[in-house]
């Protein structure tokens, strides 16, 4: 049954059953948007105040069916927020190929395939906006987070190209890159085990502990929700936005101006390597 959405804008948010995605969804409902979230298993999610549609970003057939379900109900998608993602840590040498591929399928190919799926309807409706939730980690190669950095960095750069390709269709696209936020991402990510006989045992073990501490002490996801809403209400948004601690945002600027080796030494010191 189609819902009357003439007075409301429709938002589709992937990975909205918890964390940043859920915070964004709940905030936008307060701002009178019609919000649809996605989850791999909607029936298992309780306490959600907005409809969830079934979607696994690594499976193209579920992407197509989820987008069609929202279109059948509303006739349009005004905003797509690509939030679903997976964390991955470990020495690159010891990270299994299948986990590397899964990270790219989830963090890169999933968002790209979702964008491809919604673009035709956005063109028919005369415009729209796509917001890709990336990461400040995507601006630099971080030790023991190299694969994660690569997936998010790839999406950042692809967005730059996509924006120019979409300029004639009144479709805006942008990235919002969070730093560390207090979510359950650390519990859900893949991390290569700290092996007793590994040459990386001590430095990786220490770095993994430090990363978990950063997430636990992270900012309130509501800050991301407010930042995303501000972007959504900007007529012509920039290509990149960063949300997080001042030091995390400053690290991006420092990377642009410092010599490579100096910046590398700064990261090594930060991670106590």
Image: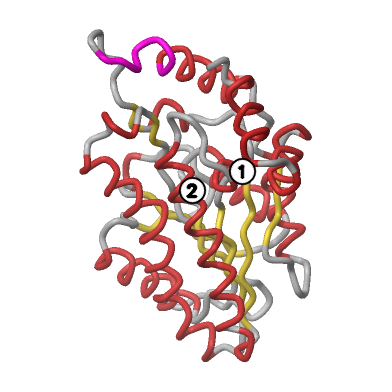
The location of residue 180, given as percent across then percent down, is 61, 32
The location of residue 46, given as percent across then percent down, is 42, 38
The structure's colour scheme is: secondary structure
The location of residue 265, given as percent across then percent down, is 62, 27
Name the mark on residue 237. none
Relative to 235, is 206 on the left or the right?
left
Of 116 and 15, which appears nearest the observer?
A: 116
Q: Is residue 33 above or below residue 191?
A: below
Which residue was labeled with disc 1? Answer: 136
Which of the two labelled residues, at mark 1 and mark 2, occupies the earlier sequence position?
A: 2
The stretch drawn in magenta includes residue 203: yes
Which residue was labeled with disc 2? Answer: 16
The stretch drawn in magenta includes residue 70: no
Q: Which residue is depicted at the point 34% across and 46% down? A: 103
Describe the element under mark 1 as helix, strand or loop.
helix
The stretch in magenta equals 198-204
Q: Which residue is depicted at the point 66% across and 27% down? A: 266
Of 149 and 259, which appears nearest the observer?
A: 259
């Amino acid at each position: 049954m189609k819902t009357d959405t003439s007075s409301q804008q429709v938002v589709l948010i992937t990975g909205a059953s918890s964390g940043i995605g859920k915070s964004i969804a709940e905030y936008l409902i307060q701002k009178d948007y019609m919000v649809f979230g996605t989850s791999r298993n909607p029936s298992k999610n309780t306490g959600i105040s907005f409809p969830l549609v079934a979607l696994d970003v690594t499976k193209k057939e579920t992407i197509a069916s989820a987008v069609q379900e929202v279109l059948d109900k509303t006739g349009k998608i005004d905003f797509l927020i690509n939030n679903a993602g997976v964390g991955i840590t470990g020495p690159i040498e010891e990270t299994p190929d299948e986990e590397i591929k899964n990270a790219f399928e989830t963090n890169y190919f999933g968002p790209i395939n979702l964008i491809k799926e919604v673009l035709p309807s956005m063109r028919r409706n005369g415009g729209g906006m796509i917001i890709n939730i990336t990461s400040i980690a995507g601006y630099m190669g971080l030790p023991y987070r190299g694969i994660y950095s690569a997936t998010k960095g790839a999406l950042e750069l692809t967005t730059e190209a996509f924006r120019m390709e979409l300029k004639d269709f009144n479709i805006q696209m942008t990235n919002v890159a969070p730093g560390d936020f207090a979510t359950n991402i650390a519990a859900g990510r893949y991390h290569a085990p700290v092996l007793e006989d590994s040459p990386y045992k001590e430095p990786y073990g220490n770095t993994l502990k430090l990363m978990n501490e950063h997430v636990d002490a992270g900012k309130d996801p509501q800050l991301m929700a407010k930042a995303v809403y501000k972007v959504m209400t900007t007529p012509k948004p920039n290509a990149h936005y960063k949300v997080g601690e001042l030091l995390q945002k400053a690290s991006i600027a420092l990377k642009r101006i410092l010599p490579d080796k100096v910046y590398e030494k700064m990261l090594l010191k930060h991670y106590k390597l």
